[in-house]
Amino acid sequence: MGRVCIIYSFDRQKREMRMLTTMEALINDARELFGYGEDENLSVFLESKGARVSTEEIFRAITEETTGTIELMILSQTRGECWSPVKVPSTLTSPSTQTISINQSQNFQIGDTGA
């Protein structure tokens, strides 16, 4: 195959580029890169879609039919890791967060925290 891919840890904090050969070789690389033990049950997922790559046949089809860099995520079923979408910025973390404060006189104030 010889295609380049990026493999991500389950939390997307670690990522490495690797050459794709087989799904088994990819899983072995992930064991070394992300510190998974030999006895851990690992699975391969499409990083952006969350779809599990369950067989070598599907793995080969992905590598043959995908243009550009393939992005995969390795998850440990043993550790209970699961795929989740990339975090979407929350309005709760934006600088213009609106707050409601209630004082003892039951007056309500709605406004910018000035953060």
Image (cartoon, rainbow, N blue to C red):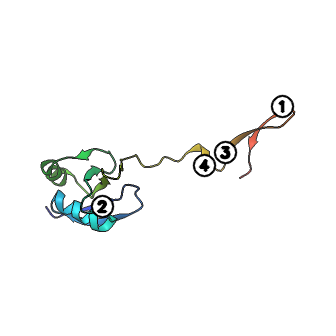
Which three-letter amino acid code belongs to the residue tagged 1?
Answer: Gln
Quarter of the N terminus within the rendering: bottom left
Disc with the residue nearer the chain's start (1 vs 3): 3
Which three-letter amino acid code belongs to the residue tagged 3?
Answer: Thr
Disc with the residue nearer the chain's start (4 vs 2): 2
Does dot 4 land on a helix, a strand or a loop? helix
Question: In the orientation shown, which residue stands out farthest toward the front?
Answer: 39
Please name whichever residue, 10 or 115, is drawn nearer the observer in this view of the structure: 10
- Residue denoted by label 4: 93
Residue 30 location (% of width, % of height): 28, 63
Question: In the orientation shown, which residue stands out farthest toward the bottom?
Answer: 32
Disc with the residue nearer the chain's start (1 vs 2): 2
Q: Mark 3 to mark 4: distance in Å?
A: 7 Å
Which three-letter amino acid code belongs to the residue tagged 4?
Answer: Thr
Q: In this view, does 5 lie to the left or right of 13?
A: left
Disc with the residue nearer the chain's start (4 vs 1): 4
Q: Do the residues labelled 3 and 4 touch (CB within 8 Å)?
A: yes
- Disc assigned to residue 106: 1
Q: Are marks 2 and 3 in contact (CB under 8 Å)?
A: no
- Disc assigned to residue 6: 2
Which three-letter amino acid code belongs to the residue tagged 2?
Answer: Ile
Disc with the residue nearer the chain's start (2 vs 3): 2
Q: Mark 1 to mark 3: distance in Å?
A: 22 Å
Q: Mark 4 to mark 1: distance in Å?
A: 27 Å
Residue 37 lies, with reference to residue 90, above or below; the image says below
